[in-house]
Image: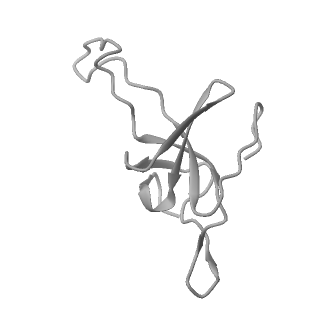
Amino acid sequence: MKDANFDIYPLGNYVAVQRLEKETTSSGGIVLTSSVETKVNRGTVIAVGEGKMLDDGTIRPCACKVGDDVLFATQSQNEFTIEKEEIVLVPEVHVMAVIGSKQ
């Protein structure tokens, strides 16, 4: 992924996701303190790896693509801060859904 500040190229079946901002108010309008805020497991795909290598040696491309808005599982995620941006590397199998219109 070529970004204004950095390049990131996930390997294999990993997906790089830029996590959405944390919610600072509840649905009822209550302002949440930093100790109550929870991380959002939703974000935008900024880069994808080549895909998963299958037993026969072929590579199955990732199902999601750059720009997709996704929900991802909390297990097996690796969080990094690169150039002040919070990036999460998630195995494709832990991307649970693409949000938006089906193409």
Q: Relative to 82, does residue 13 appear above or below in the rendering? A: below
Using the image, determine if residue 7 lies above or below residue 56.
above
Task: Name the residue: 42% across, 56% down.
Answer: 94
| Residue found at the very far bottom of the displayed protein | 56
Residue located 32% across and 17% down the image: 25
Q: Give whichever of 76, 83 is nearer the camera.
A: 76
- Residue extending farthest to the left is 28
Residue at 36% x, 18% y is 24
Q: Between residue 27 and residue 7, name the one nearer to us.
A: 7
- Compared to residue 54, the image places residue 42 above or below, namely above
Looking at the image, which residue is at 25% across and 24% down?
A: 27
Location of residue 102 in the rendering, given as x and y in whole percent from the top left corner: 47, 62
Residue 42, position as x, y percentages in the image: 43, 41
Q: Position of residue 81 (x, y in %)?
A: 60, 30
61 left or right of 41 in image? right
What colour scheme does the image use?
Answer: one colour
Where residue 84 appears, as percent x and y from the top left, is 64, 23
Numbered-mark total: 0
Work out whether residue 5 or residue 79 is closer to the camera in this orientation and state it.
79
